[in-house]
Image (cartoon, rainbow, N blue to C red):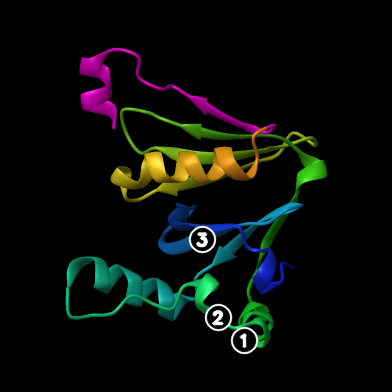
Amino acid sequence: MLHQEEIRAVIGPLGSGSVWRYWNLLLGPDQVVGWPYTIGESWQLAFSMQLPFVPPPKEAAAYGPAELQDAASGRDLRVHLLTDITRIALQITAGWNRIVVYRKDGREERYTIWRRELTQEYSAALGAAYPGLYVQEGAPTTLWAKVLKW
């Protein structure tokens, strides 16, 4: 598990699997950690996206060092060591954009980007954190394609 001072960036909220389950990706120097929201945090986030008076849940990066370890207990973290990853791709599609972590053992972890307007921000964060592993797939090349896809 990452320590607070090792977190380079936090990407999220992201989807993965269930419609009612949200995730953050914590980008560290030697690992990427999939941080699941609890069920209560997922509901709070869903309501905060629709109702401006509902505050979003606390971000993982906002926890203090001791709080982060406490908050991590009981969560089913997805820890991806960089030594086990072949590439991290941000896929741009006509539907939902997504981040895919490709592992050397052939497994893939997919995270859906819920807020399409954050795609470029997430791309920049992944590229800065992991220049040797990060790739962008399906990036638009024409002006019209860029307007429609981003």
Depicted 26 relative to depicted 147: above or below: below
Return the mark for residue 1.
Answer: none
Mark 1: few, some, or many residues within 10 Å (few <14, many ≥20)?
Answer: few
Return the mark for residue 63.
Answer: 2
Residue under circle 1?
67
Residue 121 shown left or right of residue 102 in the figure: left
Question: What residue do we see at 45% from left, 45% from top?
Answer: 122
Query: Which amino acid type is marked by label 1?
Result: Glu
Q: CA distance from mark 1 to mark 3?
A: 17 Å
Mark 2: few, some, or many residues within 10 Å (few <14, many ≥20)?
Answer: some
Query: Which amino acid type is marked by label 2?
Result: Tyr
Of callouts 1 and 3, which one flags the residue occurring earlier in the amino acid sequence? 3
Query: Which amino acid type is marked by label 3?
Result: Asn
Residue under circle 3?
24
User: Residue 17 location in percent, x, y?
Assistant: 49, 52
Question: What residue do we see at 31% from left, 28% from top?
Answer: 94
State yes or no: residue 134 in magenta.
yes
Quarter of the rendering containing residue 51: bottom left
Q: Residue furthest top?
A: 142
User: Residue 150 location in percent, x, y?
Assistant: 29, 32
Quarter of the rendering containing residue 120: top left
Question: Of residues 48 and 107, which is closer to you in this image?
Answer: 48
Of callouts 3 and 2, which one flags the residue occurring earlier in the amino acid sequence? 3
Question: What residue do we see at 42% from left, 77% from top?
Answer: 41
Depicted 26 relative to depicted 129: above or below: below
Question: The magenta stretch spans which residues?
Answer: 132-150
Quarter of the rendering containing residue 84: top right
